[in-house]
Amino acid sequence: MSDDVAPLYLNVPEPGCRPGDEPDFSDFVIPKAGAVDRPAVDVNPDEIRDMAFSIIRVLNAEGEAVGPWSGELSADELIEGLRHMVTLRTFDARMMIAQRQGKTSFYIQHLGEEAVSCAFRKALLDDDMNFPTYRQAGLLIAGDYPLIDMMNQIYSNSQDPLHGRQLPIMYSSKEHGFFSISGNLGTQFMQSVGWAMASAISGDTRIATGWIGDGSTAESDFHAALVFASTYTAPVVLNIVNNQWAISTFQGIARGGVGTFAARGHGFGIPSVRVDGNDYLAVHSVARWASERARSGLGPTLIEHVTYRAGGHSSSDDPSAYRSKEEGAAWPLGDPIERLKQHLIVLGVWSDQQHADLEQEVLDKIVKAQKESEAIGTLGAGAMPSPRDMFEGVYEEMPPHLVKQRQEAGY
Amino acid sequence: MSDDVAPLYLNVPEPGCRPGDEPDFSDFVIPKAGAVDRPAVDVNPDEIRDMAFSIIRVLNAEGEAVGPWSGELSADELIEGLRHMVTLRTFDARMMIAQRQGKTSFYIQHLGEEAVSCAFRKALLDDDMNFPTYRQAGLLIAGDYPLIDMMNQIYSNSQDPLHGRQLPIMYSSKEHGFFSISGNLGTQFMQSVGWAMASAISGDTRIATGWIGDGSTAESDFHAALVFASTYTAPVVLNIVNNQWAISTFQGIARGGVGTFAARGHGFGIPSVRVDGNDYLAVHSVARWASERARSGLGPTLIEHVTYRAGGHSSSDDPSAYRSKEEGAAWPLGDPIERLKQHLIVLGVWSDQQHADLEQEVLDKIVKAQKESEAIGTLGAGAMPSPRDMFEGVYEEMPPHLVKQRQEAGY
Amino acid sequence: MTQMTMIEAIRDAHDVAMARDERVVVFGEDVGYFGGVFRCTAGLQAKYGRTRCFDTPISELGIVGAGVGMASYGLRPVIEIQFADYVYPAIDQIVSEAARLRYRSAGDFTCPLVIRMPTGGGIFGGQTHSQSPEAYFTHVAGLKTVMPSNPQDAKGLLLAAIEDPDPVIILEPKRLYNGPFDGHHDKPIVPWKKHPQGDVDPGYYTVPLGKAAIRRTGSEVTILSYGTMMYVAEAAAAECGVDAEIIDLRTLLPLDLDTIVESVKKTGRCLILHEATKTSGYGAELMAQVQEACFYHLESQIIRVTGWDTPYPHAQEWDYFPSPARVIAALHQLMED
Amino acid sequence: MTQMTMIEAIRDAHDVAMARDERVVVFGEDVGYFGGVFRCTAGLQAKYGRTRCFDTPISELGIVGAGVGMASYGLRPVIEIQFADYVYPAIDQIVSEAARLRYRSAGDFTCPLVIRMPTGGGIFGGQTHSQSPEAYFTHVAGLKTVMPSNPQDAKGLLLAAIEDPDPVIILEPKRLYNGPFDGHHDKPIVPWKKHPQGDVDPGYYTVPLGKAAIRRTGSEVTILSYGTMMYVAEAAAAECGVDAEIIDLRTLLPLDLDTIVESVKKTGRCLILHEATKTSGYGAELMAQVQEACFYHLESQIIRVTGWDTPYPHAQEWDYFPSPARVIAALHQLMED
Ligand SMILES: Cc1ncc(C[n+]2csc(CCOP(=O)(O)OP(=O)(O)O)c2C)c(N)n1
Ligand SMILES: Cc1ncc(C[n+]2csc(CCOP(=O)(O)OP(=O)(O)O)c2C)c(N)n1
Ligand SMILES: [Mg+2]
Ligand SMILES: [Mg+2]
């Protein structure tokens, strides 16, 4: 050790605010709604590097849609979007309760992040393929996947489309363009690029979307996805949902000292943008732009959705152990449902009464589905998938050793 | 498949030049020597993003050292550098022949890339730790590691410091700051960050360097290294040696359509620069700058060394099967030894005669070491490591099952 | 002696090691401020500071790769992989790097690294929170693999692992974290605080790697097992009237073959029990070694009771998990043979 | 019949598959223009174009991950991992993804993916060009694992694998690529072109997965082996005077247990031979299964002859590699027991 040099030290980033601290988002720079340009889809990526350091926003504080990224959706479409978000939130709330009642083992909710997946889905075509994480059920709900199928899976009952094999909420629906959720973080991000490459190899017109959380961008699959997407100009939209937290770990641990997650695309020449993830209109508009790029053969886009995980990580998590309880309320981008509702009211097509009616209507629908599903069974009660199912589907055809084991097990 | 949309297609990048084609580097933009600024080591990374798209060069076409990155090395130091590079090249040539004579199984040479590791090593302190790939033996040679130890390892004879266990050229010398080479691409890049973190945790002053090839930047370890280095501001210099080829695969496959390898650092807020890897002075100067950053607690630097693999990938490879034989000669950054020699002549401290003498002197030294080493043994002839050695060192203490196996084997 | 849960015992082992040796550093996903999703590192950051216990990015590769680099520097990293199911992204750093560093560098560099991971099923964790990957690790020359079955061993083995000069994988049966489990999932568990095996020595001690423990002496059959399955074996033995000798392997590699052979030579019969998938599971190796060492003492064939050769299911967890009933059936079959 | 090396036979299988089925795409490191470092895909890019046979970035994770995505789309990707030693960065995509996709999605998505990799030692490739990782793959529910030992099988098994609806790992013994090898490294090899087993059927045919082949009939001992070791077994049998029946497993999972059991019941003795490291190697599983199925027919203990429990060394390669001498010694021991 030399004497004339100061000793080194390890820098371990810490969030500004832990339990007991006052939340402080004053360092978090939020551009005005409407402030970011909307370039042509075939823009040279080098010219829009600054977009990775700004945030595309449409809804301003007054609830108006402003700027070049607004104006694509009709009032009816917006009301439909609101319905999807309310459905997702209500569904989540009911299922969180069901989990606490022991009707399922595990649940993950979307509180505060509903706009991201709900709005994105409406910018896609029905036969595009999404490679979601566990926090994009809006892709299913906005794609009209039956709620009861979701519940049957959550309850692992005999009508569970996945035969009880997979964890609750790890849905799969090829028909609804929803790739089987893995549970291993990141893996599906690379697979989305592979699927998109396959579409391109086949001269198809379908595109893929990949999804990953802020924390999971540290995983290797994130890197591989960027490398392959960039090299082969794959028709894929790569989405990072930056909800500020990865269980108890704040986004600074994955992001490093500086920069943004979106900026990771620059090393690959991938157009990279950030969007206000709590702004239904902005997410939808950016999704349109990026999917048009993919569909026109212009290749990948990297989108960082800036949002906030308002709830716990999962039904197993209590965030008050590691972050301030007030942080959610202080989050400066607000609540996606409130903001869209407000916009519709400003537009003059919505009212508090209509909103309350919508909430009730959605709740009724969910309660009805829930009753139906619970009548079939919940985890450990009622009609369950057969243990025989456990042995099936490991391979298309059951090999002899598994037949023997199944028989040994008595099925 | 929609009818109104053009079908997608897969873009597979191809190099400009395959066997039979005329090499064409006209797209390869080479800034003038001296053109790139030398910022303070504590510069804000955001302010030097353009450095990832330029190339730091010191030696101009006339052999003069120009610009802000020149002027740190004395004539004696430069002559020493020349000696190191000539030693490495001569050593390589002799060992390639030895391989063809069956005295070893495998060899990897550095032809054209000698400046990178030789110059870099001289910017480090003796107790810093390098995490090299198989193409940085200059770190050993410029660190005065005994040639005979290298040869004994290459020949896997009884004096092989690694007891015949590891492939030839996969050296290891803690004493000389040279981490054990793995053979698995990329792994050591992340480990260099871990070592640097350990130094920081320990309040030490030593720094680490990581090394990776252009092709290997696609590996996951590259990403992990950038994430961890950035998050913890690790005292490490991360080097990408872009020698244009990864076996038969041109760098465009790893790099994607656009950008540079250095630009990968931007997503992490890591200062990232490119340097003329065939320019001894430039490499040395950049290495100084980056290691000063690391040693001062300013964290990682990403350096892309732009060079050219003038030889085959390894003794198993014949590059004429996949690239034009003329490509090497057309490579616009010239030959590192020629360029430094020329510079010394321009400085008036060197002559063709002195150079010829140096070459002879180096050759004599290498031949002498080689005779000594071959007198001990070469692969399969002479004194070999004991089979008993095969069982040792799996663990510090040999567990019972291995003792039994060793006995079964008769040792 | 203090009563501790397995979680508390593991935390205590970290604490003791960090206090004794400055070189011990602890990290992993959510390991720092929060203290780990299972709370095995709770309080360590507050006590030893952020540079000795910290959160990492979600990159198992990076975590282990950093650990290899740190260990080669001279530190003693103790790493948590959040669930054993998530170790695969780090396999290359474990198999190709940590395990081979001493060998390939002829001792020039070494890798005293501990990698802990919650393992096994029984918590309705489905495919990605239930796996038992011990077979992979035991196939890798250069690694040691450990699986404790109670708080006292968990602490002592972890302390021994931290002192070990080579990389050690510790698979922690998460079903036992809060209390042992006898395989009857419908019956309540006795928490460690009220359990005789919850007694943990205070302060520093080690349980040596490579030494098995006999949990029950018996004369008719030898049961080889480890982790959660120890209690399933005990329940089966208690319920079925076969006088079984139950061996808790504790360390899978190096294996305490002497203890095994002595027992099998005495009983003449052997049952092997593990949660992991059967084919190429560690039970196969145990069976091979027992056969190699005791062939002429075997009075009946060796039987394996294991998880089935399927991914770990969610709803059918208790059909997958080896039950006391399956063990009892196998014991009876052994006695009939 | 045409005489082909194993490399030519593999190349031919790709060619036949690509011509028959547009969905077959081939990629990997150096696989495109150059045709692979072992030249197994030479000529395919020129014939089928860059979008059906192409080079990839050096990311085994990315290669397999892309393959999983493509397979789920409906293509039939055939991937080359440059050496089996480099498969570890892709293990997560193989174990957690390819293997479980059908199961976890209840058949909604499937993964008809073939992953080929040159395997095994005998070429002085040292630690990183010599490994035999079959044990890992055979432990994973959802994978099939294949290792051919001659050109005819290499082609037919690859064609069968490409048609298989599930992921298949093909381990290609690189020591056999250019000619078989009888374990006497100091003697010249007979190239496939002059070898009876170099006869390959032209055009399309398959060798079914899950079916072993008896390479030598014999009455005294059954030798279970695969890959390069087949020829070591044959050499040993020819030299030692023990009448051995030699079974080439060809597919390790699903295993052709019927053929094995029939043979062992006949001979009463069994020797298991593989290159891979012993502990938790696939030989342990074979031993377990033979013991389970044939216990009362065994006249002596089963013996494993395998690579040692060390990393694969360089200079000591021929001390590591199971030799005919070691097999002969084991055969004699079996007959004495
Ligand atoms: C490979 C892997 N490592 C670790 C985990 C455990 N884990 C589950 S969720 C999670 C945090 C993910 O955070 P982020 O990516 O930000 O997504 P978010 O939960 O915020 O949506 C972790 C570490 C896992 N599922 N897979
Ligand atoms: C994990 C892994 N994958 C593949 C290989 C095989 N391989 C050895 S060298 C090489 C090319 C590396 O190219 P690059 O990184 O550009 O380094 P260079 O050889 O040009 O110095 C490949 C693919 C390997 N050694 N390790
Ligand atoms: Mg998050
Ligand atoms: Mg290269």
Image (spheres, coloured by chain):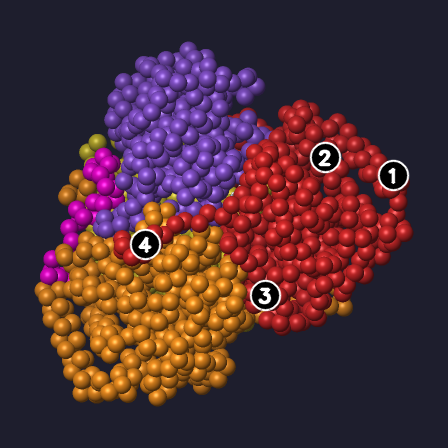
Chain colours: A orange, B red, C yellow, D purple
Label 3: how many Cα within 10 Å (few below 14, some 14–19, many 20+): many
**What is the three-letter code of the residue carrying label 1?**
Asp
Q: Are marks 1 and 2 on the same chain?
A: yes
Chain containing mark 3: B
Instruction: Provide the chain ID for the residue under circle 1.
Output: B
Visible residue check, residue D115? no
Q: Amino acid at mark 3?
A: Ile
Q: CA distance from mark 3 to mark 4?
A: 38 Å
Asked whether mark 4 lies closer than 8 Å to ligand 1, one says no
Q: How far is disc 1 from disc 3 in space, using C-alphas?
A: 44 Å
Residue depicted at 51% across the width and 18% down the height: D189
Q: Name the residue that disc number 1 marks.
A: B357
Q: Residue B270 bears which disc, if any?
A: 3
Q: Position of residue B147 (x, y in %)?
A: 75, 39
For label 3, the SS is loop
Task: Tell me whether circle 2 and circle 4 mark residues in contact (CB < 8 Å).
Answer: no
**Residue B93 - label:** 2
Q: CA distance from mark 1 to mark 4?
A: 67 Å
Mark closer to the observer (2, 4): 4
